[in-house]
Amino acid sequence: MSFKRASLTVIFTTVFIDLVGFGMIIPLVGIYGRHFGASGLQLAILGSVYSLMQFLFAGFWGRLSDLYGRRPILLMSLAGSVVTYLWFAAAGSVESLIISRALGGIFAANISTAQAYIADITSEKERAKGMGLLGAAFGIGFTIGPPIGGITGARIGLWAPGVIAATLCFLNLILACVRLKESLPLELREKARKTRVKKTLSPTLIRQLRYTAAFLPILIFFVATYAFSNLEQVFSLFLQTHFELPIEDAAYKTGLILMWSGLLGAFIQGGLIRRLVPKFGEKRLIYIGLLVQAGAMIGFSFAPSYGSLFLLAIPLAVGSGLLNPSLNAWISKSAPAERQGEVLGLSQGFSSLARILGPFSGLSLFAFNIHAPFLWGALTLLMIWVYARPVIRMRA
């Protein structure tokens, strides 16, 4: 097996197992919190601290990987994830749960380093294909994780998902130690160290935002993530209210829709995107993806039946499948080789920030009107489409 193919396999496995573990835990966080008598404020902190830590540390890990290499950062993050999942499984109080989720978010902010690894070993023509592979790992992992977590938590005990997630991460750590080679040449690491500016995190973020070549794709990525995360927390509530379903039925049917959507997204990002990019280019796919996803959100809001949601999930998955790998490829191409981790870390950090803001606005809008989160999500996509249209309508 060639170096490139072996490395892509390990990176795919790393992200896949990361997301299986993440998906196993996410549906149980609220249940764990209630089990330990969490207040409303504590539940809110418990639900948001993971993404907050990802926002703060994605750029930090990415920058460190520019200075010292991708491999040590990925290995460190995997080892840290093993510890935090075990901590989550053994937690005996709300405070301990919050600490475990905060540390979990810190170590899970390694996606930017994985993306930088892909950028190191792929040419510009292959970049979107490589980023699509990560998107497929993300989609499949998050599709498989929740049912595993729900079943093991119910049948074995609340501690089981954390232990299983830790075990998977430990096995992945062993695989990475054996098979993952360093991708960033020594001369680029030395160049990054020579040009390093020693400033605190906030000024670094401000300085990076002024990096104009990457500003527009990062902005689009932030808005697209924010628009989609508007829907994630309200979807089951929407099904329950719109179709007058019992709570258990709404939860079950939500799971089926999300599984279907995740599999579609994995198919598009893992296979179809490699055929579309050479023909249309990343910017043209972003142009199309924003419109398709906006239309799907409007359609979801006024779905006439539950069955129609499975059809509407197709354009929603198509829009997301076109946007994510194309945007990540564009961001990567906008950064010099010695700043790949830093700039991709910035984009993932702001993606995490969007996942903090999106659920808050989505739930607030849902209390006003059940259609509002979907329509607001579509409107934000259309606004960024209009703003970026002079650039993204061009063939890349």
Image (tube, rainbow, N blue to C red):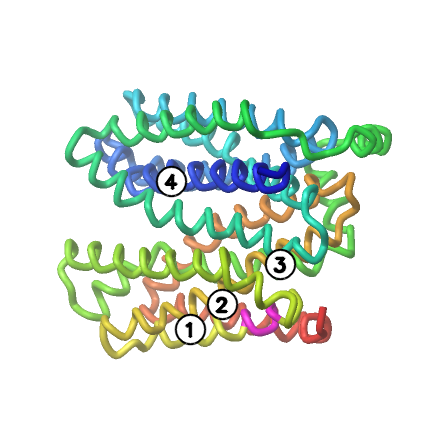
Residue 248 located left or right of residue 178: left
Between residue 148 and residue 128, name the one nearer to us: 128
Q: Which residue is mark 4?
A: 20
To which quarter of the image does residue 234 belong?
bottom left
Element type at mark 3: helix
- Mark 2 is surrounded, within 10 Å at the Cα level, by few (under 14), some (14 to 19) or many (20 or more) other residues, namely many
As drawn, 113 above or below 392 = above
Q: Which residue is mark 1?
A: 296
Answer whether labels 4 and 2 touch (C-beta < 8 Å): no
Pick the front one: 222 or 187: 187
Q: Is residue 390 left or right of residue 242?
A: right
Q: Which residue is mark 3?
A: 327
Q: Where is mark 2, residue-wise?
A: 319
C-alpha gap between disc 3 and disc 4: 24 Å
Tell me, yes or no, if residue 95 can be seen here: no
Q: Give amino acid for label 4.
A: Val
Could you say where residue 135 lies in the image, as x and y percent from the top left? 50, 52
Disc 1 residue crowd, few under 14, some 14–19, many 20+, Cα 10 Å: many
CB contact under 8 Å: marks 2 and 1: yes
Which amino acid is tagged 3? Answer: Leu
Which callout, 4 or 1, points at the residue further toward the start of the chain?
4
Q: For the residue labelled by badge 4, is the local secondary structure a helix, a strand or a loop?
A: helix
Label 4 to label 2, Cα distance in Å? 23 Å
Sequence-wise first label, 2 or 1: 1
Between discs 3 and 4, the one toward the N terminus = 4
Disc 1 or 3, which lies upstream in sequence? 1
The span picked out in magenta is: 285-290
Q: CA distance from mark 3 to mark 2?
A: 12 Å
| Element under disc 1 | helix
